[in-house]
Image (tube, helix red, strand yellow):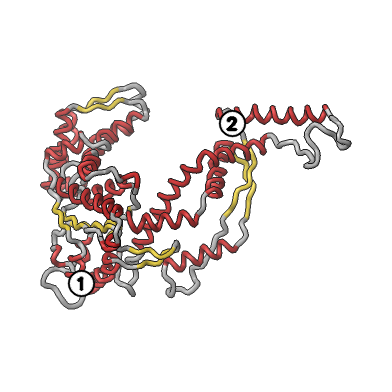
């Protein structure tokens, strides 16, 4: 948490503004939620344990930025983040994923984050070790008996021949060490021993009687008991460096420490994004049997996780009391009030996201760091082709995307992906055969009209194409 202590709600919103256009209310609410976690960690009294996060329910149609807000928030906070779809879960006893798997996914993300951080800490030491291993393979050191120095013979007398052999070896090693550092030997082939993990098949053990965590734990235990096999492989030094780097970093890292830190990170900083929560809401005024029974069952299974419970993972027990849950749904057919009251109460912050206007589409194409227009420029740039757009062309792309959304089906900003691909696919196909390096492509309003007019003229055709 130390790295993000300086982030104020305004700074968090500023970071989100770099990637997400509009949705001011949603950004403010998630920024407050994130800052509240920092504030909770600063509380010194026993109250710290009792301060629970205010989970957020985002309401808005597809493509307005619900997922992107949650994902970017996790990146700003450097927090473990997992996205799940509520419609994929089923009530306990039915075939499908059980709700606890979202917590296990979160812990895996936390493990990866902590591993990355630890890898950076031991990177230099591991690189030195790898260099020594490669050097030993290329120029094996001259072995001298432990009871004599490099300059004496068996009688303890000075031996110039032995000294020169030792010194020659050392000089050669130093020369090769420099070559390794400068990357001069990257294509040279060497033979290394590579550890092979033994495949463990426990799929049939206790079939239907073990949960995912127990199964994973059993697999780890059996694989840990089995002898590690090694296999000789002839690879380039560049490839050997990667393989050996992984082995050396894992030797230098204490995995028990990684597990402890990851569980703490997941419990206190984790964010779980539950999408399509409207799909598990029972429609108003409906009761009785049918799929609504299973939907309500999923809600009741979700409830203890969101309320705060201990979930068994292969890394140990994880408590979800302080995990931030962000749920999202379009709620076209059902309403948030169709969720069971207990679950509604666990999402006290309600945020309604605005539908995107034509002006928003123009800004989405121009302003974000990862704007679609910039992504295509990078793709063409990789082939040394310069792609440029006039302001009028960008406005026309936004207008056409907005119009198709109105006439066919509103899929929000995702429509821009389809329109841009229709506009530029022909150019992408021609590079580098016809359109060669150092060429320039200028996208104008007229070109946009010419290439995309057929899509908006024929509404029925648009329905099938887009």
Element at badge 2? helix
Residue at x-position 36% and y-position 25%:
384
Q: Position of residue 80 (x, y in %)?
A: 35, 52
Tag nearer the camera, 1 or 2: 2
Which residue is the site of mark 2? Answer: 180
Side of 13 relative to 222 (left or right)? left
Q: Position of residue 75 (x, y in %)?
A: 31, 46
Element at badge 1? helix
Seen from the viewer's position, the closer of residues 47 and 424 is: 47
Residue, far top: 438
> Within the image, what quadrant is residue 438 found in?
top left
Q: Are marks 1 and 2 in contact (CB under 8 Å)?
A: no
> Within the image, what quadrant is residue 111 found in?
bottom left
Q: Is residue 428 above or below residue 293?
A: above
Q: Is residue 157 visible in this depiction of the protein?
A: yes
Q: Position of residue 274 (x, y in %)?
A: 26, 58
Residue at x-position 63% and y-position 52%:
230
Q: Is residue 87 visible in this depiction of the protein?
A: no
Q: Is residue 14 above or below residue 338?
A: above
Which residue is the site of mark 1? Answer: 292
Residue at x-position 26% and y-position 52%:
39
Q: Is residue 67 above or below residue 309?
A: above
Looking at the image, tell me whether mark 1 or mark 2 is earlier in sequence order: 2
Seen from the viewer's position, the closer of residues 423 and 185 is: 185
Residue, far bottom: 288
CA neighbours of label 1 inside 10 A, class few (<14), some (14 to 19), many (20+): some
Side of 30 relative to 108 (left or right)? left
Residue, far front: 45
């Amino acid at each position: 948490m130390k790295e993000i202590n300086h982030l104020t709600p305004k700074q968090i919103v500023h970071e989100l503004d770099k990637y997400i256009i509009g949705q001011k209310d949603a950004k403010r609410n998630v920024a407050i939620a994130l800052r509240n976690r920092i504030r909770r960690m600063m509380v010194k009294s026993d109250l710290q344990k009792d301060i629970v996060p205010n989970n957020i329910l985002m309401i808005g149609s597809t493509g307005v930025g619900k997922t992107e807000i949650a994902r970017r928030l996790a990146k700003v906070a450097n927090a473990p983040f997992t996205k799940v779809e509520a419609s994929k879960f089923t009530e306990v006893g039915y075939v499908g994923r059980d709700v606890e798997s979202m917590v296990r996914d979160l812990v895996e993300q936390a493990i990866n984050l902590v591993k990355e951080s630890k890898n950076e800490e031991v990177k230099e030491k591991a690189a030195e070790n790898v260099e020594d291993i490669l050097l030993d393979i290329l120029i094996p050191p001259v072995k001298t008996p432990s009871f004599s120095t490099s300059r004496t013979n068996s009688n303890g007398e000075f031996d110039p021949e032995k000294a020169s052999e030792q010194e020659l070896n050392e000089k050669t090693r130093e020369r090769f060490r420099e070559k390794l550092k400068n990357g001069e030997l990257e294509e040279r082939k060497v033979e290394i021993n590579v550890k092979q993990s033994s495949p463990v098949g426990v799929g049939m053990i206790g079939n239907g009687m073990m949960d995912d965590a127990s199964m994973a734990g059993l697999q780890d235990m059996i694989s840990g008991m089995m002898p590690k096999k090694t296999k000789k492989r002839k690879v380039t030094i560049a490839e050997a460096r990667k393989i050996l780097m992984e082995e050396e970093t894992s030797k230098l890292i204490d995995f028990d420490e990684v597990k402890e830190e990851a569980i703490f990170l997941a419990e206190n900083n984790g964010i779980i994004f539950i999408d399509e929560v409207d799909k598990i809401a029972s429609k108003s005024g409906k009761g009785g049997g049918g799929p609504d029974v299973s939907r309500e069952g999923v809600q009741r299974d979700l409830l203890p996780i969101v309320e705060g419970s201990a979930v068994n993972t292969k890394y140990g027990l994880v408590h979800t009391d302080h995990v931030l849950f962000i749920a999202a749904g379009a709620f076209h057919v059902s309403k948030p009030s169709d969720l069971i009251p207990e679950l509604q109460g666990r999402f006290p912050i309600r945020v309604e996201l605005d539908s995107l206007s034509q002006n928003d589409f123009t800004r989405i194409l121009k302003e974000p760091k990862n704007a679609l227009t910039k992504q295509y420029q990078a793709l063409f740039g990789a082939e040394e082709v310069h792609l440029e757009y006039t302001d009028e062309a960008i406005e026309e792309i936004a207008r056409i995307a907005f119009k198709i959304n109105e006439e066919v089906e509103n899929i929000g900003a995702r429509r821009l992906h389809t329109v841009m691909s229709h506009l530029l696919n022909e150019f992408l196909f021609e590079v580098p055969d016809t359109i060669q390096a150092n060429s320039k492509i200028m996208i104008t309003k007229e070109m946009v009209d010419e290439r995309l007019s057929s899509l908006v003229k024929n509404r029925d055709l648009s329905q099938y194409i887009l």
